[in-house]
């Protein structure tokens, strides 16, 4: 079983959706740098206050802040981890290599026009983090979480112009990691335009090899 996992892919490819399913099945620790940063922003910590401007513009938060934020959490996840949104630059990938080896990098691809379509329709539960979509799995009430009854909200960075910038940043800074991990023979590719249940089954089969 592969238990040290990196999830790569553009915004909206389904990383968070797949991460929740995978950790539910195999019990590794889910480490989402986006979720950790949104929590810091919500609590108005020093890191959150610094990160907020970058996030609202769809830019990356500086590497060293991210590496310092995630290092201890990775070191504490001795039984395995799933990294969702980290690494996002070659500098972050090199820092990760210095912390721990990984078993696999799962690359979920999705073209830009589909990313924009999905993310403008995404809603997230403020209370339990459930990810919903008004196009693909519309809840009965678009403001009420189907899992816990909490409030479904739209992320601040899910506005069209910010989504476009996030995709540009992905192509410039994060897509080179596909080559980085291919050179190390760690990459496995998945087509993010397929149904999320089909993608999960494929990923889980490969993790158990
Ligand atoms: P982060 O939260 O990581 O955002 P992201 O990578 O842009 O990814 P998303 O969460 O938008 O999408 P996802 O791939 O998880 O898709 P989801 O499963 O929700 O980062 C946010 C910001 O934080 C960054 O912009 C940056 O500023 C900062 N940051 C974070 N990490 C950083 C780092 N390491 N370095 C520097 N800065 C960092 O799915 C999307 C939608 O599609 C949902 O509505 C879902 O229901 C639907 N869906 C999912 N799968 C399918 C499917 N197969 N078919 C149909 N619909 C589907």
Image (tube, rainbow, N blue to C red):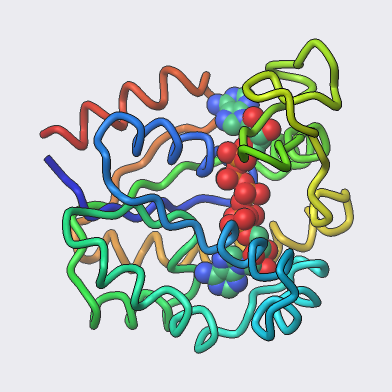
Residue at x-position 27% and y-position 46%: 28
Residue 181 in the figure: left or right of residue 12: left
Residue 130's spot in the image, x, y percent?
A: 62, 33
Residue 79 in the figure: left or right of residue 197: left
Residue at x-position 29% and y-position 44%: 188
Depicted 85 relative to depicted 19: above or below: below
Q: Nearer the viewer, residue 67 or 59?
A: 67
Q: Nearer the viewer, residue 120 or 20?
A: 20
Residue 42's spot in the image, x, y percent?
A: 73, 64
Residue 164's spot in the image, x, y percent?
A: 79, 55
Does the rendering let one see residue 150? yes
Residue 113 in the figure: left or right of residue 31: right
- Residue 73, quarter of the rendered image: bottom left
Residue 170 in the figure: left or right of residue 8: right
Q: Nearer the viewer, residue 139 or 203?
A: 139
Residue 147's spot in the image, x, y percent?
A: 62, 22
Residue at x-position 25% and y-position 76%: 97
The C terminus appears in which quarter of the rendering? top left
């Amino acid at each position: 079983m592969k238990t040290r996992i990196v999830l790569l892919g553009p915004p909206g490819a389904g990383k968070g959706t797949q991460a929740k399913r995978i950790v539910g099945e195999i019990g590794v620790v889910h480490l989402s740098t986006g979720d950790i940063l949104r929590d810091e922003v919500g609590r108005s910590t020093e890191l959150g206050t610094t990160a907020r401007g970058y996030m609202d513009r769809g830019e990356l938060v500086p590497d060293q802040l991210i590496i310092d934020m995630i290092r201890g959490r990775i070191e504490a996840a001795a039984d395995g981890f799933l990294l969702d949104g980290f690494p996002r630059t070659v500098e972050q990938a090199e820092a990760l290599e210095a912390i721990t080896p990984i078993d696999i990098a799962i690359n979920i691809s999705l073209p830009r026009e589909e990313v924009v379509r999905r993310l403008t329709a995404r809603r997230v539960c403020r209370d339990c983090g459930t990810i919903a979509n008004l196009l693909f799995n519309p809840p009965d009430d678009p403001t009420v979480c189907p899992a816990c009854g909490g409030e479904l909200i739209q992320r601040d960075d899910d506005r069209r112009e910010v989504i476009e910038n996030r995709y540009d940043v992905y192509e410039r800074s994060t897509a080179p990691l596909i080559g980085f991990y291919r050179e190390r023979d760690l990459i496995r590719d998945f087509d993010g335009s397929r149904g999320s249940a089909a993608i999960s089954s494929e990923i889980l089969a490969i993790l158990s090899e």
